[in-house]
């Protein structure tokens, strides 16, 4: 059973890699979807912070900016197209100054903002949207545009900010990149629809935890030997690997029209097939537990291997959990969730040592 | 009836750290500089006699105070015989754990020495023992009058559970010693209930024995608020916890073994954010039982989101009660004043401060705007004082006295605490670029009193205590 799970994961990864090689060589409106953009390198060549909004913006870090900075909101004269807060870590123990938030829209335009002392970033810049959008949330598809009986679609209202999607990256001041796995919705600059901010979900007390960029170590210190799984290792994985690698069904909230086509042949798939309207960004892994988890909801059962299934006690340096997430050349990554550490970082060393000691559930 | 009150903020240019001495139980970090810019002083507030001089001291949580080794602090302002408090903090509790000072509770006298003991949480703290989970959150119980002496430190089940997010105290098992209630709203006890929360009751005096309530399919999102108080008038404190769209009440007793899906009372509402603040405020209607105040700070009122609402529920309620249908068990529902005020984010039971024989209470609306001569202070915040004798089925927010924040974005009213002398301490953690501060008022007179403090922007040398 365990071999089957691991084999299926390997096959899945190979598929993603092959798909990436075949279809993600260019990044234009034709492949503006979560699948194709998972490993897209961060755009370069722009002026860092060129789209920073005016004002000091030192208030209400971690709050949903879009509640006030929206047409008819309390700060309706200062409407953001995007805003949010970046922290040193997912727990949001401290805000992070000097991070760069990079967006690329459907039209290929690149936007760059930098965080201030409160970790806040924001912009007023108008952005192009992709009006061909479908939202799927927890397996339920919500149509944000008109779908005709013959399967064709009528574009949504482009002024509806809910249909405006972006690929996003966060660059740590040291150059390491963390990228959003999905194509995310962000508010527009026109119209009257409620604006969104990253902090709606990526906040200290949001469902996914804070948006973070730093390579800050999860714990202040680690012993050099005799590491404990619960005492030292699990906090690292929960801090760095969730919210993606969590138990249960974990699908993207939003995908684009291009996700309605099968990735291999670009054959149109009816909307009733919700499986292709979203991707599982946990990649069927549960890194909140040692042995993985079995999640049952109604007739749905989701089995996910855990941390122990991705370590190599014979050759710790080749452990998947380490190699996948090491910092690559600045601007690139081979992990859809970005890079976490170098071999010199204390978190990395702690995990490696625990693996070398047998990767015990101690 | 909405009187404007100019509250006093006593600005402190720098923190003078008067050493109270390190004991063998010290958990402070000696000689370390802290920075209070962005520290959110006033996220939690409360009172306890820390130094044992018989005078209550003021405690201000600053969970994002920065230092080299950890984040968070609790600042102690020494009570004086002139019924005020020192203007500089005289001690600094440091848990060595991140976001220490996030929540505070005065437990009452746990160890029968005549002094009230207290607890402070660090929502990203760690347990001290080898088998404990790190980064789960921790709660440290301090001995009143013990100058920082620790009675017990406890931690959560899993990393990033945010154990200690909310604290409460009450004698749940009726043994005469107050017990500690701790929430961990991001706990996962079942893969199918990821981050659905847990609430624990740790029993005094040693806080080793505990009862845990974990989320179920029926009752999720546990622990954004917890409270204790005698709802059913049996002389024993009852446990109240928030769940998604619900407040669940479990009656206390000598054998306290609650089942998550079998509360004695289940109060429900579709109002957004229902249960984010809970308090047992005492008898308002003259019928046996202590009334329950429940905040729904995200409630939409007249199409305005996050206006907020507070439900006052009769203590005589039984079984499952759907409050949105205006049942007999609902004494009154009080709505906030306007868009994004988040009325009901905090609630404090004050007792009978005006001597009219009914308990009074305060409700925070930390996102409320304040009109000034020069314009609007957005998100300044307000706290509304309701007199028990004014509460009827037709009470509105207009029947209250409003205390107002002074500057924009300070979120005055985020936290509330009553001193034994009846003064109301109000936290404003977003003041001055999240440096934060507190203000103190006298509900009986409607006047500001000395005791506010904004704290300095930079800290001095941390004292071990």
Image (cartoon, coloured by chain):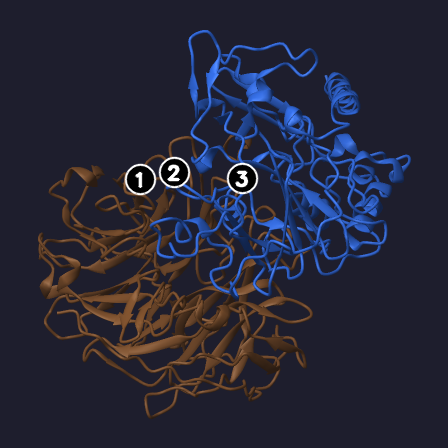
Chain colours: A blue, B brown
State the mark number for residue B260: 2
Note whether A255 is above or below B331 in the view shown. Answer: above
Q: Give percent across and percent down for residue A92.
A: 58, 55
Mark 3 lies on a secondary structure that is loop
CA gap, disc 1 to disc 2? 7 Å
Residue B367 sits in which quadrant? bottom left
Q: Chain of mark 3?
A: B
Q: Position of residue A119 (x, y in %)?
A: 59, 59
> Mark 2 or mark 3, which has the lower sequence index?
3
Could you tell me how far apart the alpha carbons at marks 1 and 3 are, in whole angstroms?
Answer: 21 Å
Q: Residue, x 59% and y 57% (percent of image)?
A: A52
> Same chain for the residues at labels 1 and 3, yes or no?
yes
Number of numbered discs overlaid on the protein picture: 3
Decide: few, some or many residues near mark 2? Use Cα within 10 Å; few <14, some 14-19, many ≥20: some
Q: x, y percentage for residue B465?
A: 58, 79
Q: Of residues B127 and A275, which is closer to you in this image?
A: A275
Q: Give the class, few, some or many, for how many residues have Cα within 10 Å of label 1's Cα (few <14, many ≥20).
A: some
Residue at 33%, 48% (x, y): give it. Answer: B298
Residue labelled with disc 3: B188
Q: Quadrant of the N terminus of chain A?
A: top right
Secondary structure, mark 2, is: loop
Does mark 3 fall on the same chain as mark 2?
yes
Residue position for label 1: B263
Q: Are marks 1 and 2 in contact (CB under 8 Å)?
A: yes
Q: Earlier in the sequence, mark 1 or mark 3?
A: 3
């Amino acid at each position: 059973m365990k071999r089957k799970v691991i084999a299926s994961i390997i096959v899945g990864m190979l598929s993603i890699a092959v798909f990436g090689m075949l279809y993600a060589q260019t990044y234009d409106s034709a492949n503006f979807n979560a699948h194709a953009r998972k490993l897209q390198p961060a755009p370069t060549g722009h002026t860092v912070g060129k789209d920073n909004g005016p004002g000091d913006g030192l208030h209400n870090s971690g709050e949903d900016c879009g509640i006030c900075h929206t047409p008819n909101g309390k700060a309706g004269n200062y409407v953001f197209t995007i805003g949010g807060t970046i922290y040193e870590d997912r727990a949001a123990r401290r805000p992070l100054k000097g991070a760069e938030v990079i967006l690329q829209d459907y039209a290929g335009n690149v936007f760059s903002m930098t965080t201030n002392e409160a970790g806040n970033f924001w912009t007023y810049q108008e952005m192009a949207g992709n009006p061909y959008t479908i939202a799927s949330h927890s397996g339920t598809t919500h149509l944000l545009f008109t779908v005709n009986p013959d399967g064709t679609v009528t574009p949504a209202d482009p002024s509806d900010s809910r249909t405006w999607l972006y690929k996003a990256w966060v660059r740590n001041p040291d150059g390491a990149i963390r990228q959003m796995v999905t194509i995310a919705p962000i508010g527009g600059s026109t119209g009257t629809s409620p604006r969104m901010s990253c902090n709606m979900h990526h906040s200290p007390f949001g469902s996914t935890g804070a948006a973070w960029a730093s390579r800050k170590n999860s714990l202040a210190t680690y012993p050099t030997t005799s590491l404990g799984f619960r005492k030292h290792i699990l906090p690292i994985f929960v801090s760095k690997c969730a919210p993606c690698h969590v138990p249960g069904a974990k699908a993207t909230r939003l995908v684009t029209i291009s996700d309605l086509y099968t990735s291999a042949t670009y054959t149109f798939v009816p909307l009733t097939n919700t499986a292709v309207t979203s991707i599982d960004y946990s990649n069927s892994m549960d890194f909140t537990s040692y042995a993985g988890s079995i999640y049952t909801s109604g007739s749905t059962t989701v089995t996910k291997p855990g941390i122990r299934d991705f370590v190599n006690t014979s050759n710790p340096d080749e452990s998947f959990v380490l190699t996948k997430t090491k910092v690559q050349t600045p601007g690139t990554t081979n992990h859809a969730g970005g890079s976490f550490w170098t071999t010199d970082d204390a978190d990395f060393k702690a995990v490696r040592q625990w693996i070398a000691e047998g990767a015990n559930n101690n | 009836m909405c009187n404007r009150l100019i509250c006093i903020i006593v600005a402190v240019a720098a923190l003078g750290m008067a050493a109270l001495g390190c004991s063998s139980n010290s958990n402070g970090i000696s000689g370390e500089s802290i920075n209070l810019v962005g520290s959110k002083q006033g996220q939690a507030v409360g009172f306890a006699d820390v130094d044992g001089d018989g005078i209550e001291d003021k405690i201000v949580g600053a969970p994002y105070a920065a230092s080299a080794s950890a984040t968070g602090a609790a600042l102690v302002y020494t009570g004086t015989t002139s019924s005020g408090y020192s203007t500089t903090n005289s001690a600094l509790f440091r848990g060595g754990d991140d976001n220490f000072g996030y929540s505070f509770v005065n437990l009452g006298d746990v160890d029968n020495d005549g002094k009230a003991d207290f607890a402070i949480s660090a929502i990203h703290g760690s347990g001290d023992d080898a088998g404990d989970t790190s980064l789960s959150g921790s709660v440290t119980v301090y001995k009143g009058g013990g100058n920082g002496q620790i009675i017990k430190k406890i931690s959560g089940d899993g990393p990033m559970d945010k154990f200690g997010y909310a604290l409460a105290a009450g004698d749940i098992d009726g043994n005469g010693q107050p017990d500690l209630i701790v929430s961990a709203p991001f706990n996962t006890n079942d893969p199918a209930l990821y981050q659905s929360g847990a609430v624990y009751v740790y029993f005094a005096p040693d806080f080793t024995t505990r009862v845990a309530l974990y989320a179920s399919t029926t009752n999720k999102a546990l622990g954004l608020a917890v409270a204790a108080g005698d709802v059913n008038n049996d002389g024993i404190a009852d446990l109240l916890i928030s769940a998604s769209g619900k407040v669940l009440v479990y009656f206390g007793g000598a054998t306290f073994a609650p089942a998550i899906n079998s509360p004695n009372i289940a109060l429900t509402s579709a109002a957004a954010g229902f249960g984010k603040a809970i308090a047992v405020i005492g008898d308002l209607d003259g019928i046996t039982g202590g009334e329950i105040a429940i905040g729904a700070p995200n409630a939409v009122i007249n199409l305005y989101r996050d206006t907020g609402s507070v439900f006052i529920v009769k203590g005589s309620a039984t079984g499952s009660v759907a409050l949105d249908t205006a049942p007999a068990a609902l004494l009154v529902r009080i709505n906030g004043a306007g868009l994004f005020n988040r009325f009901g984010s905090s609630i404090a039971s004050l007792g009978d401060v005006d001597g009219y024989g009914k308990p009074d209470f305060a409700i925070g609306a930390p996102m409320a705007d304040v009109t000034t001569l020069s314009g609007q202070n957005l998100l300044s915040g307000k706290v509304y004082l309701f007199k028990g004798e004014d509460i009827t089925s037709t009470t509105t927010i207009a029947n209250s006295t409003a205390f107002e924040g002074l500057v924009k974005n300070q979120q005055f009213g985020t936290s509330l605490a009553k001193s034994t002398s009846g003064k109301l301490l109000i936290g404003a953690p977003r003041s001055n670029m999240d440096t934060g501060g507190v203000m103190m008022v006298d509900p009986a007179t409607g006047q500001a009193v000395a005791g506010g403090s904004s704290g300095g922007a930079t800290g001095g040398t941390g004292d071990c205590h």
